[in-house]
Image (cartoon, helix red, strand yellow):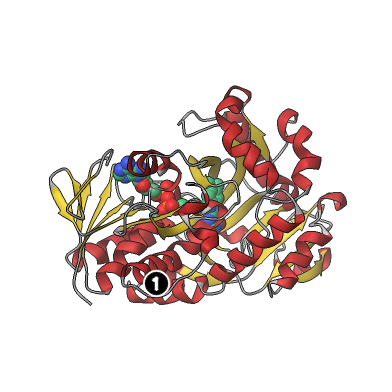
Amino acid sequence: MSQKKIAVVGAGIVGLSTSYYLQSSGHQVTLYDQNNPGSGTSRGHASVIADYGIPALNQPDVWKNLFRYLFYKDSPLAISWTYIPSLLPWATQFLKNCNVTSMNFTAKTMAGLLKDALPTYQSLLSEINANELITHKGTLYVWMKQKEQPSNAQIKVRQLNNVEQINISKHEIHDLEPNLSDKIKGGWYFPKACHTLNPDKILKKLFNKFIEKNGLFIQERVSSVNNEDKKFNINSQNYDDLVICCGAFSKELVKEIEGKTIPLETERGYHVEYLGMQEYLSRPTCLVESGMYLTPLEYGIRAAGTVELAGNTDQINQSRINFINNNARKLIPKLQDYQNTWLGYRPTLPDCLPVISKSSKFDNLYYAFGHNHLGWTLGPITGKIVTGLINNDKFDNKALEINRFIK
Ligand SMILES: Cc1cc2nc3c(=O)[nH]c(=O)nc-3n(C[C@H](O)[C@H](O)[C@H](O)COP(=O)(O)OP(=O)(O)OC[C@H]3O[C@@H](n4cnc5c(N)ncnc54)[C@H](O)[C@@H]3O)c2cc1C
């Protein structure tokens, strides 16, 4: 295999992992990001390696809950009224996918990616000397309102895709996590799940390893690329291959290159952090009715979640932060005031599947974005798949192709 000069645009977990694996397989990689590497959505999530994370959002129950999403302040999903017209192309396709067949298809496709996610993560962390930043404690789903517990359909989808899940009583939950509220009625336990203890440190170590091995980083926004003589040109630098990994911001570059608009949206999410309180919790715990996780990190507890459909703006919605804080303190009554807050952008496509594929127009252009709620989990395996595509390994997964949106 010959060494290529490759540009990767976007230095989140997907772009950093892709750069790392391309470089490890002998290519000369230049990574571009308009901001500091690892400073986007990949730093603020719930930090769970959620290899149990199916089904996705496209479930039939969405129809039943639409009224609540639109009108209730205490809903885990909020929609900005002023953003509805811009949301329509994504929303109409997403709603069409909220049926049993599509839910099962998304789940099966995701399960195919998730099955190698954890071992790939573990190897990557070991290669960058970051083993101490991942821990295996499983994950809990708990509920306080009986009617909010996971539906039979959700449990069955996980069963069908071989996810290990254990139904546990409130007493067993209390034994595992004594600081959780005694109002909890029951839960499910995912014993295989792991979580990371400091995403910032992992992203920094991955970036430093890339630079140490002669990777180049250019801090600039890539707004246009030219293709001449089968090479891509970015600001007068020529590359044999180009990979776009811009998360929720990939739509503009796809439009520029393919000349088509894809229905990529963002599900905005927030976190708040309670510094120094990590001893109150041993493992990530999701309060099902709020769609929010509490995760013990090295330096405190992070409460992360909610879905807000309001576009890629950086305007903070304080009521979403209050929602997370109120639910976090409901789950662990001992929690004191929070210190840090953060807003991030989950890249989301209407079938809840990412794009991991070659371009429909150019043989030397690749896409890897749209990882939705599972990008932290799937970043390393995606980087491996993209590296395989560039090295001509066989990866035949039509469900993940960009062509499904570019006709
Ligand atoms: C609240 C919340 C909780 C979550 N919890 C989890 C979880 O527990 N587990 C899990 O697996 N996933 C979780 N996720 C999802 C996960 O965080 C994302 O799917 C993932 O971080 C996306 O990574 P990415 O590399 O695609 O995008 P990003 O991290 O957003 O990186 C994209 C990069 O591209 C750069 N960029 C964009 N446009 C350009 C341009 N034109 N030129 C140059 N650079 C550009 C940006 O600056 C950015 O650095 C959560 C997300 C949220 C919001």
Residue extending farthest to the front is 407
Residue beneath the point at 81% across and 41% down? 64
Q: Is residue 383 left or right of residue 302?
A: left
Q: In the depicted view, which residue is nearer to us: 309 or 200?
A: 309
Q: Position of residue 254 (x, y in %)?
A: 38, 44
User: Image quarter for residue 286?
Assistant: bottom right
The residue carrying mark 1 is: 125
Q: Residue 98's x, y, as percent? A: 71, 48
Q: Is residue 27 left or right of residue 156?
A: left
Q: Would the CB of label 1 be found within 8 Å of ligand 1?
A: no
Q: Position of residue 168 (x, y in %)?
A: 80, 69
Kindly identify the amino acid type of the residue bearing the numbered disc 1.
Leu
Viewer can see residue 165: no
Q: Residue at x 43, y 64 (%)?
A: 382
Which element is circle 1 on? helix
**What crowding class fits label 1: few (fewer than 14 Cα within 10 Å), some (14-19), or many (20 or more)?**
some
Q: Image check: 80 left or right of 290?
A: left
Q: Please name whichever residue, 327 or 124, is drawn nearer the observer in this view of the structure.
A: 124
Q: Nearer the viewer, residue 92 or 270?
A: 92
Q: Is residue 131 left or right of 151 when viewed as pictured?
A: left
Confirm whether residue 293 shows in the render. yes
Q: Quadrant of residue 284?
A: bottom right
Q: Position of residue 83 (x, y in %)?
A: 57, 26
